Image (spheres, helix red, strand yellow):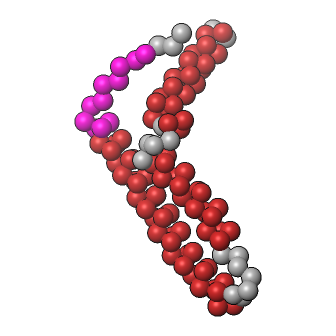
Amino acid sequence: MGVIMEVNFNEEDKYYLAKKKVENIKGFYSNLTSYIGVNIVLIFINLYTTPNHLWFYWPLMWWGVGVLFHGLKVFEVFPVLGKGWEERKIREIMDKEKENQSKWQ
């Protein structure tokens, strides 16, 4: 059904992939730092201004879900959108493009 291709990366490609992974990890840690800092401020504001009406947990919870999924993707724990899925999707799109080009030639 599908073609399994062995990919041999040269040093430049390996460097690019490693650099991209480091940038993704750096982005995750930046997101996590913002999440912690902003939510500490929001908790303080909420408890200082309206301690009887707690609302800080809403951004804490929903942004936390986003940070969680970001971490799962960056550290490749979430298999659905992992590297294998990306490669399969790229191959699928490339194959469709080849089919479309050959239809009109």
In the displayed structure, would residue 56 be above or below residue 78?
Answer: below
Residue 100 sits in which quadrant?
top right
| Viewer-nearest residue: 105 or 83 | 83
The residue drawn where x is 56% and y is 75% is 38
The residue drawn where x is 38% and y is 47% is 21
Residue 27 sits in which quadrant?
bottom left
Q: Can residue 18 be seen in this view?
A: yes
| Rendered location of residue 35, percent (x, y) | 53, 68
**Which corner quadrant holds the C terminus?**
top right
| Rendered location of residue 22, percent (x, y) | 36, 52
Extreme residue toward the bottom, this view: 48
The residue drawn where x is 45% and y is 48% is 74
Give the residues drawn in magenta, as a range: 4-14
Q: In this view, does 82 lie to the left or right of 18?
A: right
Extreme residue toward the front, this view: 52
Q: Can residue 90 be seen in this view?
A: no
- Does the stretch in magenta take in 5? yes
